[in-house]
Image (cartoon, rainbow, N blue to C red):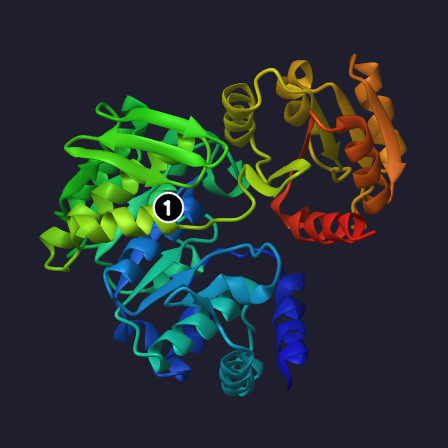
Amino acid sequence: MNVQQCIEYIHSKFRKGSIPGLHRIGELLDMLGNPQKELKFIHIAGTNGKGSTAAMSASILNAAGYRTGLFTSPYIYRFHERIQFCGEQIADGDLVEVVNHIYPYAERMADPPTEFELVCAVAFEYYRRKKADIIVLECGMGGLMDATNIIPSPEVAVITNIGLDHTDMLGDTLELIAGAKAGIFKEGSHAVIYRGTAGVEQVFEDACAEKQIPLRKADFDTLVCRERSLFGQVFDCGDRKGIELPLLGEHQMFNASVVLSVMDALTERGWAISEAHIREGMKTVTWPGRFDIVCRDPLFIIDGGHNPQCIEALVKNIRDYLAGRRVIALVGVLADKDYADMFRPVMELVEQFVCITPDSPRKLEADDLARYLRGVGAEAEGCGEMENGIRRCLELAGSDGVVLCFGSLYSIGAVKAALDAVLAE
């Protein structure tokens, strides 16, 4: 298989959907000689902030000179983003070589792997071949029964912000969801958590006590934002003063505090990470799709947040960074989503919505979405195709406005490509 065929083969497993359990990934990795057992990990679970936390952690470890892997999902622009090593996406040749190696093993399984399980296996085999020092590994969904939890005890197990998401699989209370996430805690590790409710923190405390592992809670009490602009922010955390972070939003400062606790845990375990490494890694981190400025003239921002906590963070970002500016929103949704909860919090902050039709069999037509938004008091119009919607947004925004596209990580690649095409006209 060539690189395109390899990616198509991986995507062909999507029909199985998300099926919790470790028996398929375990069987496949057994046939591969269990590459995950030869690697060290930072394992990250949570509802929101997993990817940003992973990106910051990997950036610091790269700055410290470690051969660092970064495994995340979903991808924004191309599949290769999911599997990175030393700050670079997996090369076509490496992807082809590893997928062709794994293919016959996967195909002989009576219960074949899901897409996510197959990607995990590809990543573990690739990182073994690259002789990685450490992998920053983002969970897919949940924790205990997530395919990534096939790994041995990680160096540090991290839980980011907990919210109500995937309640059909993880439970309908924060405590139940926290219990599922706490499944990544294993004997011999350290644990770090994002601060939460007393009930959620108690779940984590009990899990760590049972596993007899030390628990660090991120230091939110001493966080102070010193500067904030559309170019980034500068913050203090405890004794660390003036840390520069290019990622926008107060929530990213809280995620950064989690990362600082992770680095302290790693240092305690003997990893050589200096304050200079931490500052350099924070200063140079990149993470696309989260209140991400993809064009500054005209100002065009993309945000992939879609659940209630993400929308809450988006509202705060609009108030913090775009106060006094006219905001034109480019939006498109799937018909089976509860889009009322997505749009209601931002309506008073948006001058006009421009609706597009997503490229999906589950799409909600642009005119139908515009009709709904007008029915609840918003200014809205349907534009159908992506490029037409972008042209209309730029026209409405003019020289002093802002175009804000939000609602789903999966459409970001298409939006950016369409924006580039329009600006090139």
In this view, the residue in front, 358 or 245, is 245
The image shows residue 179, relative to residue 3, as above or below, that is above
- Residue 229 percent location from the top left of the image: 46, 29
- Quadrant of the frame with the N terminus: bottom right
Residue 418 in view, yes or no: yes
Dividing the picture into quadrants, the one containing residue 104 is bottom right
- Residue 198 percent location from the top left of the image: 27, 23
In this view, the residue in front, 303 or 145, is 303
What residue is rendered at 64% in x and 63% in y?
14
Residue 364 in view, yes or no: no
SS state under label 1: helix
The image shows residue 332, relative to residue 225, as above or below, that is below
- Residue 159 percent location from the top left of the image: 33, 42
What residue is rendered at 54% in x and 67% in y?
80
- Residue 133 percent location from the top left of the image: 25, 70
In this view, the residue in front, 11 or 105, is 11
The residue where tag 1 is placed is 53
Q: Amino acid at mark 1?
A: Thr
Callout 1 crowding tier (Cα within 10 Å): few <14, some 14–19, many ≥20: many
What residue is rendered at 55% in x and 28% in y?
314
Looking at the rendered structure, the number of numbered marks drawn on it comes to 1
